[in-house]
Amino acid sequence: MNTETLHTKTEKQLVPQLRFAEFEENWETSLFDDLVFIVNGQVDPKIEPYCHYPHIGPGNMSSMTGELLAYRTAKEDQQTSGKYLFNEDHVLYGKINPQLGKVVFPKFIGVCSADTYPIECKKQKLTPYFLKCLLMENRFYKYSVSVSRRTGMPKINREELSAFRFRYPTLPEQQKIASFLSSVDTKLQQLTQKKELLVQYKKGVMQQLFSQQLRFKQKDGSDYPDWEEKKLGEVAERMILKNTDNQITFVLTNSAIQGIVSQQDYFDKDIANQSNLQGYYIVSKDDFVYNPRISTSAPVGPIKRNKLQKGVMSPLYSIFRFNEPLLEYFEHYFETTNWHKYLHSVANFGARHDRMNITNSDFYKMPIPMPCFEEREQIANYLSGLDTKIETLAQQITQTQQFKKGLLQQMFV
């Protein structure tokens, strides 16, 4: 990315704060409707050839990044209602919940959901990539959120979208902006792909390590001793201390994806009654928590380690504390699916379909693989090293996203 030809504008003109030196003209002002078509021609995704086309909806768009997530064909997604056909030059905008800022430029032919607008630029006026950036820029974000505030599901309709007034430069400047910002997109894609590959690699290595398909060697090249198998109750103690004096008010929750987090941060509000937490269990730092609620990302419920401060949790959770060292080893083990089969075997499926029903007795009989300390240490260190690399990439992605967000604010009017 070459920033040498960018310079800062201080004049109160219809020009961006940050601009390429060769452009001096004021940007023009126009209504959205004057420069784009909002496509409305529907097709039947049940019939040929549309059933084989890629199917894109808001769920396939990453919020605020402009990135297209994994998708399938309309037939694979079992889409049966009429949808919009889009082509290589259309930008897709998710009209539901505009505060999510979902917009992509797929660059291929496909079918999109009714919750998505395919938008076509009028020739010689606007380029698709510039339009994509415009829909991610702060002025449009504020406009879309403000006009979509209504009872029921917030969404921006065609009339509101068409009425948006914005500024745009000549095509050569649009193309220069597109070329520059697309280089940032390329960097983001490379970092994201690298992170995803590393995450998948870690998953594969974990499964192999904890199933003993892959073993470490001792320093002299010899094998470590055979693994033992112990019950969870032999290596960990159930924690049932309740917050009877109501002194602890920091409420925790167990998220399958984020791990142990503050309930207020997770739900953006307090769910528990702060004045009535006597029945909640006290959870110390480094305690492990089992959440029996099942989800796509946690088919038997997640087990996570509390890396925050001491707090309290609902008695629906099971809390336990290891009496063995190397907590990272156990933390990584519960990231695998190796222990899922046992929980399925002891669960009572006559209960609620969204929650595993397991007795405490059965839960603490869960088998835990126990190599010798030295091998456990090698496993923990290796997997924690991968975590460090993944976290570094995640930080680089966030920094690059923030860099792009700043450019969008400065390179648009």
Image: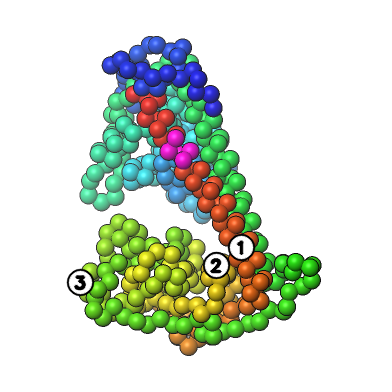
Q: Is residue 360 visible?
A: yes
* Residue 386 image point, x, y percent: 60, 56
Viewer-proximal residue, 183 or 57?
183
Q: Position of residue 65 (x, y in %)?
A: 45, 40
* Sequence-earlier tag: 1 or 3: 3
Indicate the amino acid at tag 3: Ser
What is the magenta segment's predominant secondary structure? helix
- Which residues make up the magenta segment? 399-403
The image shows residue 35, relative to residue 60, as above or below, that is above
Question: Height in image: 314 above or below 43?
Answer: below
Cα separation, mark 2 vs mark 1, equals 8 Å
> What is the distance, in whole Å, between disc 3 and disc 2 at their CAs?
35 Å
Contact, mark 1 vs mark 3 (Cβ under 8 Å): no
Name the secondary structure under disc 3.
loop
Number of numbered discs visible in the structure rendering: 3
Quarter-of-image position of residue 227 = bottom right
Circle 3 sits on which residue?
Answer: 275
Q: Residue at x 67, y 71 (%)?
A: 375
What residue lies at 24% left-to-right and 44% top-to-bottom? Answer: 149
Q: Which mark is residue 381?
A: 1
Circle 2/circle 1 CB separation < 8 Å: yes
Find residue 92 and report its horizontal and vertical position in percent: 44, 37
* Marks 1/3: CA–CA distance: 42 Å
The quarter holding residue 200 reads bottom right
User: What amino acid type is highlighted by mark number 2?
Assistant: Glu
Of circles 3 and 2, the one toward us is: 2
Pointer 3 local density, CA inside 10 Å: few below 14, some 14–19, many at least 20: few
